Image: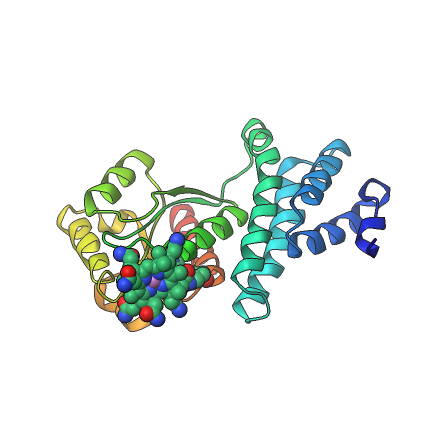
């Protein structure tokens, strides 16, 4: 039996429990995260505080280590899965208490491209950071993005492409937004292994995101700019 197995979450005080949840999230332990969330809620924590302090706090550590090459895709997927377990408990409670949402993003992999591992990671990390994410999946034609933008009215449009043959399609989508006069209604973030900053600029995106952690940081930055503009 490992040392981990000996820890009884319910016996920890709040601070110790949150620290333990950081470790459990890092280790991708979904059941422990669910238990931790239930304990904190049972102790009277507001769902939003559980989300930001315990889950997002833990995921921030995961995101930083992923960005720095200390954690790799399988570990991050497990952590994200554990986080999703905790979030599933909080989601209905958050809706009841009307917790502030950071923002909303529609994301999808572009037409002709079926790679979705990176996009899924971005979606999960964005959800972990408090964004509502509408994931359109893979192989999205411009019409699919347009429909989702119209229906969901997000703050951010995210596009992913992993092939040099599909990345130019991002420009087709952005050009269509320009043609329809709705380009400035959204922050457009793009990502995928073959892209770079220069490409992002060339196609008229707001920003290229090297990885999921950068996507979260960039999205937060654009949301705070938007809030500042609105309150000015
Ligand atoms: Co494909 N594949 N693949 N593949 N595949 C690549 C991309 C390739 C580089 C492999 C190689 O040859 N070295 C190559 C592309 C070459 C090129 O375009 N120049 C390639 C090829 C050629 C192909 C096929 C054509 C192979 C064939 O059939 N002959 C075919 C194409 C199918 C299609 O899409 N039409 C194909 C198929 C597949 C699989 C189905 C087997 C599988 C995909 C499974 C899946 O996604 N469900 C697959 C895989 C796994 C890969 C590699 C090995 C790994 C991709 C991956 O998941 N990386 C890949 C090689 C590589 O990239 N090194 C390769 C892990 C992931 C976490 O990283 O996706 O980069 P990534 O996402 C990162 C960032 O890029 C960023 O954040 C993520 C997380 O940090 N990011 C975003 C991504 N999207 C973002 C969106 C954002 C923000 C950030 O929006 C805001």
In percent of width and height, residue 38 lies at 71, 35
The answer to which quarter of the image holds residue 136 is: top left
Q: Can see residue 208?
A: no
222 or 67, which lies in front? 67
Ligand 1 quarter of the rendering: bottom left
Q: Can see residue 120?
A: yes
> For the image shown, how many numbered marks are present on the structure?
0
The answer to which quarter of the image holds residue 33 is: top right
Please name the residue shown 25% across and 67% down the image: 164
Q: Is residue 193 left or right of residue 221?
A: left
Is residue 152 shown above or below 103? above
In percent of width and height, residue 232 lies at 40, 50
Residue placed farthest to the top in the image?
Answer: 96
118 or 204, which lies in front? 118
Is residue 100 shown above or below 23? above
18 or 219, which lies in front? 18
The answer to which quarter of the image holds residue 134 is: top left
Please name the residue shown 60% across and 54% down the image: 59
Please name the residue shown 59% across and 58% down the image: 60
In percent of width and height, residue 117 lies at 42, 55
Residue placed farthest to the front in the image?
Answer: 1
Residue placed farthest to the left in the image?
Answer: 179
In percent of width and height, residue 125 lies at 50, 52
Render colour scheme = rainbow
Please name the residue shown 60% across and 53% down the image: 79
């Amino acid at each position: 039996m490992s040392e981990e197995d000996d820890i009884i979450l319910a016996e920890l005080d709040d601070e110790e429990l949150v620290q333990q949840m950081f470790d459990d999230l890092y280790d991708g332990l979904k059941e422990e995260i669910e238990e931790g969330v239930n304990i904190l809620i049972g102790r009277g924590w507001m769902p939003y505080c559980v989300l930001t302090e315990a889950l997002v706090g833990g995921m921030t550590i995961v995101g930083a280590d992923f960005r720095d090459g200390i954690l790799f895709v399988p570990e991050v997927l497990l952590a994200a899965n554990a986080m999703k377990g905790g979030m599933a408990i909080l989601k209905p409670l958050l809706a009841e208490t009307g917790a502030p949402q950071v923002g909303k993003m529609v994301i999808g992999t572009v037409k002709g491209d079926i790679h979705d591992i990176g996009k899924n990671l971005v979606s999960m990390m964005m959800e972990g950071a408090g964004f509502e994410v509408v994931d359109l999946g893979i192989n999205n034609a411009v019409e699919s993005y347009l429909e989702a933008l119209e229906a969901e009215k997000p703050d951010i449009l995210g596009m992913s492409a992993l092939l040099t043959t599909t990345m130019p399609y991002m420009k087709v989508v952005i050009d269509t937004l320009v043609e329809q006069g709705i380009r400035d209604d959204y922050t457009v973030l793009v990502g995928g292994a073959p892209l770079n900053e220069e490409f992002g600029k060339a196609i008229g995106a707001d920003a290229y995101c090297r990885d999921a952690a950068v996507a979260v940081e960039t999205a937060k930055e654009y949301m705070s700019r938007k809030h500042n503009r609105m309150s000015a």
